[in-house]
Image (tube, rainbow, N blue to C red):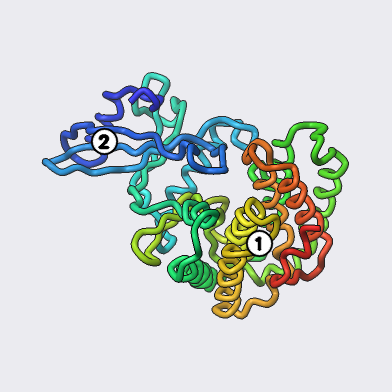
């Protein structure tokens, strides 16, 4: 229990109150250790808590957030994220079901909000294998039919959730504003890079930010596209079980936004893994990418997405090019990602079938 920043007895008492009766703590395991992944940073700590009640074992996921520079400096910043995840996570198909939201005082006791020192989120345990492991496997193994079926299933899922539209232009404009200026998004991620970064100088980052501000104004013309979204649909937030049965978790940054956000978030990871192996979108990753994109476009008939996806690709490109988030990239991979960011931002309408043209 040493990794959990609360008293053991306080946690036990909380579980007894939440689940109505005596419990026995069986064990804990820290999740998201990033030991077997190219990603090396997250926004908090997550633990698997196993307890026994009425002779039966049950496992739940216990999540906290830490103070950081990505717009989480204040206690209320962190509370906002966890409160959102608890509330919105209950209304998204296939999302891990949130069980409770609470906080601990400095003494490890449950008290009024004014005493809170750290908030936590409790969700159901999602069984399965992280999707990024599928992508990692393809660096040494052959593509299978199941890999392609999973890419299709993910695209179909997005098409389904994006089909719920909402007529609230101000909410779409907020999404565009936060895409550019939020601490977890473009400007916040840029601020996470080293100053005077040798691989990409300050004036180049400044130019990207200027282009993104221009894109914010372009997006104001697309408020009719507001739809339900996941908000952080990447391979570390997806678990597959048998076949194409999967769950998602860590829904982020709002219930409604731009469909291109989710589409770009997953598709750029096919590009990333392919860059690591082939230096371009090629091989099994190209097949996965093309299957995913073609399935999504076939289900949605959304040709307009090519006019709005650019700043969302830029956001995710900045994340996966970051030396803090992904420290082990080669200089060549990082430079191609920067090329991709600059080139897509300079394109009014992307050719989604020719991703490699934006890497040069």
Q: How many marks?
A: 2
Q: Nearer the viewer, residue 120 or 344?
A: 344
Separation of disc 1 and disc 2 at Cα?
39 Å
Name the N-terminal-most of marks 1 and 2.
2
Q: In the picture, which quadrant includes the C terminus?
A: bottom right
Q: Nearer the viewer, residue 324 or 172?
A: 324
Residue that numbered label 1 is attached to:
172
Q: Is residue 118 visible?
A: yes
Is 164 above or below relative to 253?
below
Which residue does the image show at 47% across and 44% down from the upper left?
83
- Residue 181, percent from left and from top: 72, 46
Helix, strand or loop at mark 1: helix
Using the rendered image of the protein, determine whether residue 166 is visible from the camera's viewpoint.
no
Which residue bears the numbered disc 2?
15
For mark 2, does the 10 Å Cα neighbourhood hold few (<14), some (14 to 19), or many (20 or more) residues? some
Q: Residue at x 60, y 32 (%)?
A: 68
Q: Which is closer to the viewer, label 1 or label 2?
A: 2
The residue at the point 71 percent across, 48 percent down is: 333
Residue 59 to residue 304: above or below:
above
From the viewer's perspective, is 129 left or right of 205? Answer: left
Residue 255 percent across, percent down from the top left: 53, 58
* Screen quadrant of the N terminus: top left
């Amino acid at each position: 229990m040493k990794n959990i920043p609360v008293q053991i007895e306080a946690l036990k008492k909380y579980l007894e109150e939440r689940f109505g009766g005596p419990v026995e703590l069986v064990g804990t395991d820290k999740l998201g250790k990033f030991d077997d992944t190219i990603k090396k940073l997250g926004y908090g700590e997550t633990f698997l808590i196993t307890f026994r009640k009425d002779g039966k074992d049950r496992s739940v996921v216990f999540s906290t957030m830490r103070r950081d520079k990505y717009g989480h400096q204040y206690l209320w910043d962190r509370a906002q994220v966890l409160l959102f995840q608890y509330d919105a996570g209950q209304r998204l198909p296939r999302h891990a079901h949130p069980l409770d939201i609470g906080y601990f005082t400095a003494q490890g006791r449950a008290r009024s909000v004014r005493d809170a020192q750290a908030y936590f989120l409790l969700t159901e345990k999602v069984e399965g294998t992280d999707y990024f492991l599928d992508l990692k496997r393809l660096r040494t193994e052959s593509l299978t039919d199941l890999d392609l079926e999973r890419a299709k299933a993910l695209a179909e899922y997005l098409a389904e959730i994006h089909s719920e539209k909402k007529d609230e232009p101000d909410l779409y404009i907020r999404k565009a504003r936060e895409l550019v200026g939020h601490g977890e998004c473009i400007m916040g991620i840029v601020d996470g890079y080293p100053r005077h970064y040798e691989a990409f100088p300050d004036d180049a980052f400044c130019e990207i930010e200027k282009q993104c501000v221009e894109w914010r104004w372009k997006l104001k013309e697309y408020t009719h596209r507001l739809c339900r979204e996941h908000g952080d649909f990447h391979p570390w937030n997806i678990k597959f079980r048998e076949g194409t049965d999967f769950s998602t978790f860590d829904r982020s940054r709002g219930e409604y936004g731009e469909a291109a956000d989710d589409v770009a978030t997953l598709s750029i990871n096919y590009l990333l893994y392919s860059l690591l192996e082939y230096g371009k979108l090629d091989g099994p990753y190209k097949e996965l990418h093309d299957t995913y994109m073609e399935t999504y476009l076939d289900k949605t008939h959304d040709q307009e997405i090519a006019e709005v996806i650019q700043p969302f690709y830029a956001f995710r490109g900045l994340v996966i090019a970051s030396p803090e988030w992904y420290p082990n990239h080669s200089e060549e991979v990082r430079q191609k990602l920067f090329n991709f960011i600059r080139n897509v931002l300079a394109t009014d309408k992307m050719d989604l079938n020719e991703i490699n043209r934006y890497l040069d």
